Amino acid sequence: MTQHRSRIAGIGTYLPTRIMTNADMSALVDTSDEWIRERTGIAQRHIAADDEYTSDLAVEASRAALAHAGLGTENIDLIIVATATPDLTFPATATIVQHKLGIHHGAAFDVHAVCSGFLYALAVADNFIKAGQATNALVIGAETFSRILDWTDRTTCVLFGDGAGAMVLSAGGEGEGLIKTHLRSDGQFCDLLYVDGGPSRTKTVGHLRMQGNQVFRHAVGKIAGSMEELAGMAGVPISDIDWFVPHQANQRILEGVAKKLAIPVEKVISTVGRHGNTSAASIPLAFDAAVQDGRIKRGDLVLMEALGGGFTWGAALARY
Ligand code: ACO
């Protein structure tokens, strides 16, 4: 039986208009542009307005992705939002997005895997499509991490930003589309990167806490391992892959993974300097930037990868 692939029919993104530079950051906490750039590669990040919610960012990105795909909202029968910063504890942000897009058919739900969330959402949508349960899925990564940062903690607040990216995944890909996804998690590392509040334990929203150097230590090995495993399962040598679209946590992690797998750094799409770490939104934001500037073209082999809180991690290989 020929297995049809899920095609990446379109991609779109949205960034809030307010830009916060490293100089702005050093007015808040004891840090400097030099420290942030040297340790992370980040120069600036976008911050959502007080009345701009994760669902609003997701809706803007979805509209752009639908326009790129040449599809209307009537074509969408599945919406998955990957987010760790939902509008509300419930309902799912995906249902709020569905309502704001004027869609009243199909199914909508959230996926929670923090910075790997987009890969998890992509894998779920791909499986829905392959099982014949969906035809056109909106797969969205949308975050307002500025809302869960401790703005007095210089070790975390300088790293993150807000934004959203969406892909339209459609049935009917033959040579093109998602080739394979590889998902991993290991909850023993949950204390290294977490939010110290939640409805059940503290009845609060909480703030992001991270042992950055510990996370860093795990990131390169786990991400590179997942990429190698995926490439092996797909029968595609790493050297045949045209573009690498990593989760944008830190320029040094991006370069560490590239070095470990002997990937030329020019093949690694990096937007961390302009966006900071936008968690689940970072892969589609980086992917779209490279489509817009003409680097990623139709037919190119693209590998996406991420590691996030949990830990969760993984990779996805697609022929765009
Ligand atoms: N400005 C100035 N100094 C700082 C800052 C800052 N913003 N932050 C920390 N420092 C200081 C520390 O206090 C420490 O000072 P000390 O030596 O006097 O104690 C010194 O800088 C070094 O601190 P480290 O934490 O060892 O610095 P490191 O080189 O590890 O860089 C960083 C920190 C950028 C956080 C890095 O560890 C990192 O990027 N980690 C991974 C983050 C990541 O990948 N997250 C992934 C997923 S995110 C998600 O899932 C939500």
Image (tube, rainbow, N blue to C red):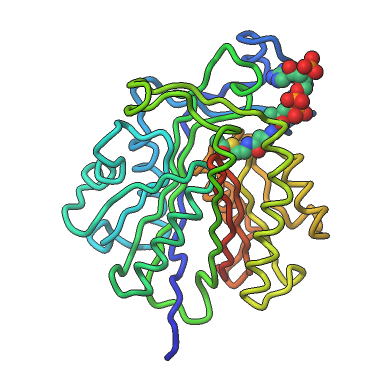
Compared with 51, 193 (above or below) is: below
Residue sitting at 36 percent across and 70 percent down? 129
Residue sitting at 64 percent across and 50 percent down? 246
Residue sitting at 21 percent across and 44 percent down? 99
Instruction: Say if residue 37 shows up in the picture.
Output: no
Residue 203: give x, y in percent of width and height. Answer: 33, 21
Residue 168: give x, y in percent of width and height. Answer: 40, 60
Compared with 230, 105 (above or below) is: above
Residue 237: give x, y in percent of width and height. Answer: 73, 73
Compared with 177, 156 (above or below) is: above
User: Which of the pair 40/296 is nearer the observer?
Assistant: 40
User: Which of the pair 28/213 is nearer the observer?
Assistant: 213
Compared with 84, 79 (above or below) is: below
Residue 118: give x, y in percent of width and height. Answer: 48, 51
Compared across the picture, whether 54 is left or right of 149 comes to left
Outermost residue on the bottom side: it is 1
Quadrant of res 209: top right
Instruction: Say if residue 231 shows up in the picture.
Output: yes
